[in-house]
Image: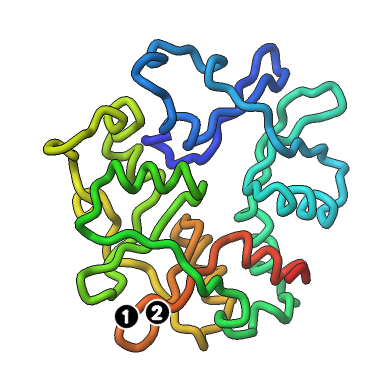
Amino acid sequence: MRDTGVRIIPIVESRSLKGIISRLGVLSITSSRSNLRAIDIAEEPLVVVNPQDELNSVVDRMLRVDEWYAPVVNERNEYLGVLGLEHIISYFISKEDKPKALFNPVEQYMTREVEFVKIDDHVSRLWKKMLKYRYAGYPVLDDKDRVIGVVTQYDLLRYGFTRIDLESESPPRKGPRVREIMSTPPITVKPKDQLLKVAETMITRGIGRVVVVDDIGHLVGIVDREDVVKAIMGKT
């Protein structure tokens, strides 16, 4: 996950799908259970897709359980690949006749009540927030409430911070701060920008969310892959 940036890893035995490992699953490994095999932290996929499934139905199932990835198997449960929301976005933005929603302003689809972290928050606090809200990424604000970065589950993995490292943090040792692991500069858009700009940015930059800011860099919203897919598929 650290080397490739993938968000889930299917577990396959004799071509048969046995489960998946998620980033959150890796981040949640405790020190008392650190000597594990892949199958020991496997999760049952919330959605499993067959190549013949109708796309609209698949999207409904994924959105219903807030899942961005689904393993694809055949009728014998043999693993074939993974379908991600980014694949759906990429397909539609590559079409000559693009969905009309992509030309609407971002403000029509963004989430306005956004969870965020501050630049000097401890990474242990960020990790607990990720577990509580199950959000994979957060805008980072400075002391003037301007967006100066983004921090994600991948950043935690990239720097080697998992529950093993963070569960024992206690005063006065609270560990590293968000400023040490966040990605900068933040990738942002304005409320009046077209949703197409967000969709293209997600695909070209390989990111799951884009922060929406005003003219002075204050946080006004966020758009993630789920928001884009809902708009494209007419499910808003």
Residue occupying image coordinates x 56% and y 68%: 199
Image quadrant where one finds the N terminus: top left
Where residue 116 sits, quadrant-wise, is bottom left
Q: In this view, does 218 lie to the left or right of 59?
A: left
Residue occupying image coordinates x 74% and y 51%: 64
Q: In this view, does 6 lie to the left or right of 177?
A: right
Indicate the colouring scheme: rainbow
Element class at badge 1:
loop
- Residue 151: give x, y in percent of width and height: 34, 54
Residue 157 is tagged as: none
Residue occupying image coordinates x 20% and y 34%: 170
- Residue 30: give x, y in percent of width and height: 39, 22
- Residue 58: give x, y in percent of width and height: 80, 49
Amino acid on which the number 2 mark rests in the picture: Val
Q: 104 or 173: which is nearer to us?
A: 173
- Residue 197: give x, y in percent of width and height: 52, 76
Residue occupying image coordinates x 62% and y 81%: 108
Image quadrant where one finds the C terminus: bottom right
Judge the density around disc 2: few (<14), some (14-19), many (≥20) Cα neighbours within 10 Å: some
Q: How far apart are marks 2 and 1 (CA)?
A: 5 Å
Q: 94 or 113: which is nearer to us?
A: 113
Amino acid on which the number 1 mark rests in the picture: Gly
Residue 217 is tagged as: 1
CB of mark 2 within 8 Å of CB of mark 1? Answer: yes
**Total marks in image:** 2
Element class at badge 2:
strand
Judge the density around disc 1: few (<14), some (14-19), many (≥20) Cα neighbours within 10 Å: some
Q: 147 or 170: which is nearer to us?
A: 170
Where residue 179 sits, quadrant-wise, is bottom left
Relative to residue 216, is residue 113 depicted above or below? above
Residue at the farthest front position: 171
Which residue in the structure is indicated by mark 2?
213
